[in-house]
Image (tube, rainbow, N blue to C red):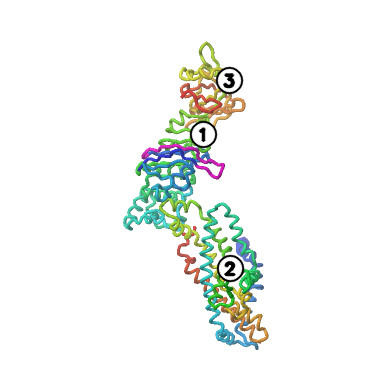
Amino acid sequence: MAVAIGNKSFRNVWSKAIPYLLILPVVVYYALFWVRPVLKTVFESFRDTAGQFTLQNYAMVFSDPDFIPAVRNTAIIVVFSVTLEFLAALFLAILINRKFVGSSFFLFVAMVPMALPAVAVGAMWLTGLTAHGWLNSLLFYLGVSKKIYWLAGSEWALLAIIIIIDAWQVIPSVMIILLAGLQNIPVEAEEAGYVFGGNFITVLRKITIPMLQSTIQTAVILRLISAIQIWLIMVLLMGFNRLPVLVERIVYYHEEVPGLDISFQMASGYTIIVSVIVSIAALLYLKVSGAFGGNQEARQ
Amino acid sequence: MATLTMQDVTKQFGRKVIAVKEFNLEVQDQEFLVLLGPSGCGKTTAMRMVAGLEEVTNGRILIGDRDVTDLPPRNRNVSMIFQNYAVWPHMTVFDNIGFALKLKKMPKDEIEKTVKEVAGMTNIDMLLERYPSQLSGGQQQRVAVARAIAVYPEIFLMDEPLSNLDAKLRVSMRTELKAIHDKTEATTVFVTHDQSEAMSMADRIVIMKDGEVIQVGSPDDVYHRSASIFVADFIGTPPTNFLEVDVKSENGDYRLVNPHVDFKPESHISESLRDYDKKNLILGIRPENIVLTNQKDAVLSAECLVSEPQGSHQVVAIQLDQQYIKVIASAQPKINPGETVHLAFKQDTLRLFDPETTLAIGD
């Protein structure tokens, strides 16, 4: 009897352990290649060059004259580019979802910017935005004879250019996510909306968008995170320091001023700050959009 | 409450596909009309044009005296029950039912009163605060019904509303829908491919095939006086039995002859046989109109192939050449495979069809 019980409890333990054993390889992988570097960065950000604990790195980051502008510029880019991208992508997704003649060709064309790597996008727009670039040539043919010095404008003009280029590149991917979501909504749900008194706008507002809610959350959160991390495009167009943003600061200290012995510490400090900001932004957005409980039932 | 008129309504998709062809129909006030046909026959398209969800290629649609052909769905005063319920998952049952009323800017207390009233009618008044995902399929269907009643439409459209329910629920919902129709007195167009559903619910049935109307009539009409081979075959389980026969005349009398049968039909049929002397015809007879008899009176004798007991009756199948003939016989005495059965036809129920046109003759 005792043997039988022992046997049974052993089997119990074993069957409980199996799932953990199965995910063990992933855990090991994460520990080695994800947790370790993250922890290392966290430690580095609290250590001085001699390896002692210090808050000096953060003090230096906060007193960097470009820190406040970097936070401000990042915030502006995030707010405007995510809003612009979301609205334009939703519009395009709804348009393409109507399946007009040639809509699949239009979808193909609209997706081209998505296929370009950021460096190519930067190079392409750089050749466009210089004084003798293709953008000015185009305008010249259209009858605008005065050259526009695109990259010599104020900080606001530069921000606008960055936002537009980012939107140009990113709208397709947001659109694809939203389109996939739209195609998951049963046609009858919208048709019922039309039969029961809705016009295009009311059906869109009261049926389509609410039913698209979880897709919108996914798309916006992905965009939010990557918009905070924009940097390459500005460096390609304007070089470092012209339009400081948070991640550009990390790269700047890490890559451009490696001679200073505090460079690595500054970069670590910035990295941690960016990570915290990204996490807070993501959590705030999820909270505001009601992803945590509340109307779970609403999303099937 | 109103009549519905469809005049020469045609729907064409692209350049080639004609889904509905010159469809003419007059639905009476308070009538329960069923559009019946196999899938792809255009019945759903016809209904969707009435709803305004599908544009009309040609023809007019009138509700009462109003020409609604070019109106958007919201201005037609119709309501619809969809096959997959199409209740909105992000709204409570209350909001689902009240959606149209809210858009109509009905005062709040009146909305509440109407919603509670129709929820009571459909037995979902306990569920008003729930979300659709917390409901069973049958309950979701009730929500869809309640939502459709709440607007008090002139025309009720139902697009195979029962086909997603399990068999037992389907039969009980039939009764309920019919009862609700009697209570609301709304003119109803009901689309289905299930002929027994159509027979049990309809005032009139419209049978469609390949976008065209084949027959319009009461359930009795389409069952007992099927206008074509297609209708005779489509309506009824088991369907009508068909036999190819030759018409032969013998001193002024006409006989129907094939290798298995040779008999002189009753006079009401022989009238119409005059034009078909020496020609081929298709004889149609329903399984319950073939009766077991003794050897002397038999028109047809054959070996029983299988018999399917159904409790209240049995279905006896015999084989003639490549073809099965099914007979509905009383449950007792039980007929065993291999037993020889002697069969006679109830003469007044015979239908004859022209094999070329497939249409019934003698009407």
Residue extent of the magenta highlight: B11-30
Q: Residue under circle 2?
A: A139
Q: Is residue B128 magenta?
A: no
Residue B197 visible in the snapshot: no
Badge 2 marks a residue whose secondary structure is helix
Between disc 2 and disc 3, the foreground one is: 2
Which amino acid type corresponds to the residue marked 3 in the rendered image?
Asn
Left or right, A78 with respect to A257, comes to left
B353 versus B104 height, above or below? above
Q: Measured from the top left, where is residue A241 in percent x and y?
A: 60, 81
Q: Residue under circle 3?
A: B258
Q: Is residue B15 magenta?
A: yes
Between the residue at mark 2 and the residue at mark 3, the CA separation in whole angstroms equals 88 Å
**Host chain of mark 2:** A
Between the residue at mark 3 and the residue at mark 1, the CA separation in whole angstroms equals 25 Å
Label 3 neighbour load within 10 Å: few <14, some 14-19, many 20+: some
Between the residue at mark 1 and the residue at mark 2, the CA separation in whole angstroms equals 69 Å
Which amino acid type corresponds to the residue marked 2 in the rendered image?
Leu
Badge 3 marks a residue whose secondary structure is loop
